[in-house]
Image: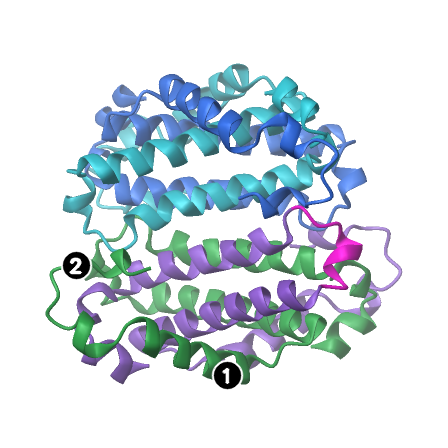
Chain colours: A purple, B green, C blue, D cyan
Amino acid sequence: MRDFTDTRDWEQFHSPKNLSMALSVEASELVECFQWLTEEQSNSLSADQLAAVADEIADVQMYLVRLADKVGVDIVSAVDQKIVKNEKKYPVEKVKGSSKKYNEYE
Amino acid sequence: MRDFTDTRDWEQFHSPKNLSMALSVEASELVECFQWLTEEQSNSLSADQLAAVADEIADVQMYLVRLADKVGVDIVSAVDQKIVKNEKKYPVEKVKGSSKKYNEYE
Amino acid sequence: MRDFTDTRDWEQFHSPKNLSMALSVEASELVECFQWLTEEQSNSLSADQLAAVADEIADVQMYLVRLADKVGVDIVSAVDQKIVKNEKKYPVEKVKGSSKKYNEYE
Amino acid sequence: MRDFTDTRDWEQFHSPKNLSMALSVEASELVECFQWLTEEQSNSLSADQLAAVADEIADVQMYLVRLADKVGVDIVSAVDQKIVKNEKKYPVEKVKGSSKKYNEYE
């Protein structure tokens, strides 16, 4: 991806600020795939819908890798650390069977 | 991550529709890290800013993996296919040195 | 709002680019209010949920006014023009009772 | 707008949850207009760029009005209350000339 950008002289556009914008735009294109579907429908996509979703998932992943590369973040290690944090923040015994809604913990 | 969700009884919340929403919310939290910075400042983050950015990158990655898992998309293969598409859509000889702005191709 | 920004020396941050970012962040905070609710639950919010939603609606509206003011767009006239466009794009006789899904027209 | 939606049988799609998604998608289309521009360029848009921005501003405004209508929020009064809150949260004497960055207050 570095090479793809570099050979096209697009490095000039790829500040972390701009990449965060592009990432959120692609995330919204994913939302657009689902916005008028019911939750149930979102669980059984047609082949066309699935192809569109796969395309947008790829776009999000690519901008995320670009951004992480530019700011020097190792995604795998960032995820590992976040999982440890989340396990402390949402202990199973506190969450399971609680009448609290999911995002009341956040 | 499947296990993390399952042991907390959170599977009920994780329809693809809802996961696309959560993903875009996390992408916006990344945007929030950069919104008042200049592009130049976004290239030289402080340790605190970088830690916040790494955290949000992890959140985006985790929801992306969850969503891809739920709809049955293999992220690596989706990215591979998208790179091939992009190479056709933006050929180096057409893009390099062109006076067109980046997103006029999209 | 011009005065609010000006007296705080915040004008320097309010480029249209930055305001579009802030607007989308606030729109995502609205999404966050609804992300784990069912559609049905989203139709009958508690007082607390409604207060949070009202707050975010206000934030979106305020950044939209700021942005429109900075680029010189009259919101009311932009909306009037868009309604005319939409009436042509989605004629009642073509849409009503169609088996097409909503966003297949877009 | 109620009438526009109703005559097209689109009321079924317009749960507050779905409208929040559509709103954030439109906000991202605004971001898309600005993502590869510098802040300076975003201050002097061409006629074509401005027309695109005006269109997206209208879309955001329309979904915001729809959403507010569905949940029963009066936008003007929500904004009035938010301005009062913001004046307390960011007092001029504390903000002006402070070396703190804008979002360090948030």
Above or below residue D17? Residue A27 is: below
* Of residues D71 and D22, the one drawn nearer to the viewer in this rendering: D22
* Of residues C45 and D68, the one drawn nearer to the viewer in this rendering: D68
> The magenta stretch spans which residues?
A36-45
Give coordinates of residue C87: x percent, y percent: 52, 25
Give coordinates of residue C29: x percent, y percent: 54, 44
Give coordinates of residue C17: x percent, y percent: 27, 44
What kind of element bears circle 2? loop
Residue drawn 56% across the image and 73% down it: A82
Residue most toward the front? C93
What is the number of the mark on residue B100?
A: 2
Give coordinates of residue D101: x percent, y percent: 28, 47
Q: Does C20 lie within the magenta span?
A: no
Label 1 to label 2: alpha-carbon separation: 36 Å
What is the quadrant of residue D3 in the picture? top right
Above or below residue A78? Residue C74 is: above
Above or below residue D95? Residue A3 is: below
Are tags 1 and 2 found on a single chain?
A: no
Above or below residue A55? Residue A1 is: below
* Of residues A23 and C101, the one drawn nearer to the viewer in this rendering: C101
Residue drawn 52% across the image and 69% down it: A55
What is the number of the mark on residue A76?
A: 1
Look at the image and tell me whether residue C15 can be seen. Answer: no
